[in-house]
Amino acid sequence: MTDTHEFDVEAELKAALADYAHREPAPGYEAEHIVRRARRGSRRVWAAGAAAVAAAVAAAGLLWLPTGSGTPDPTFPATHTTPPPTGHTTPPAQTRRGDAEDPAYQIEITRDFYQRVSTAQTGATLSIPAIKAQEDLFVDRAAYERYWGLDGINATCGARANGFVAFQTQVTFYDGPRPLPRTARLILDPATGRVAKVECHPLGEKSGDATLGGFFGALVESGPEDTAGILAARQDFFAAEMETRSTLTGMCTTTVPETWYADSPAAATLTHGWTVRINDGPPFKVGIDENGRISSTDCES
């Protein structure tokens, strides 16, 4: 309710002085001077009171909006305390990551991309920098949101993978020893060398590598406790010269893979090979003979 009675500071002060003068002689004050000081004091009191009210309103989370009558209109709760910025803000352009036409760079970014996909699909808890690094592989956030998806599922064309065979930017996926029905190809942005698109295609007859998929896929599916399954995989895919390998898997590591990644293919007249990484371990070379059996490893690569 609005108080209609006005408080007349000047009149009240004069009345008080008159009453005081009847009881005791005045010491020579000038009423007008006192009135002026009282007016200034009343303005200071009003300003302090208004500031206190504003602070209380802010603490309560209320936003006071003026109405046409001049009476404050409380709106609860307040959703914005400052107006949104006007105009269009252009995000900073992505810096150049590498030469999209360079074969070595194509191998590098494809490996980085799909090893991060592999980590995401194992269900590992990722740090904020790791998530930022995922997005940083793409030309922009729109491409990241479209072609990464939940745990990188869009990057493997809708199915989870634990094995990868990459030829430049083209990748064949494996679930255990079984190739998945679709392969992927990374399309790189010419200006920045970052991923602009992930194309998915049906599995071709010459996609991937049956020996790598069969052997490493069998190890993934067997797990570290299945010694019989690991020995069976060695028997199925090792050439005679590999049978004397002392480690359980016969590879350059004692670790049984949860995931594996192969790239950088090399070929001779009758043999070929790949550079393989198990989990997050160091690379090593695997040679495959003309019969499709693993015939050598180079653990110094």
Image (tube, helix red, strand yellow):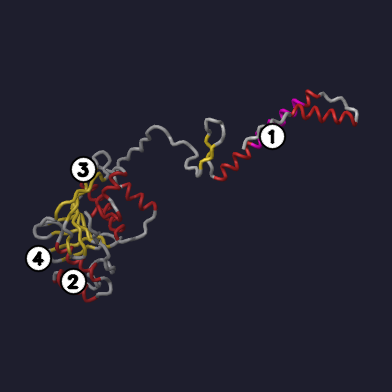
- Say what secondary structure mark 4 lies in: loop
Q: Residue 92, position in %: x, y?
A: 36, 38
The question of residue 45 being in magenta is answered with: yes
Give the magenta range: 35-49
Provide the residue designation for mark 1. Answer: 45
Could you tell me the amino acid type at mark 3?
Glu
Name the quarter where the N terminus is drawn. top right
Q: CA distance from mark 2 to mark 4?
A: 15 Å
Q: CA distance from mark 3 to mark 4?
A: 34 Å
- Say what secondary structure mark 1 lies in: helix
Q: Are marks 2 and 1 in contact (CB under 8 Å)?
A: no
- Marked residue nearer the N-terminal end (2 or 1): 1
Q: Residue at x 78, y 23 (%)?
A: 32
Rendered position, 35 above or below 110: above
- Marked residue nearer the N-terminal end (2 or 4): 2
- Marked residue nearer the N-terminal end (3 or 4): 3
Characterize the local packing of mark 4: few (<14), some (14-19) or many (20 or more) Cα atoms within 10 angstroms. few
Provide the residue designation for mark 2. Answer: 234
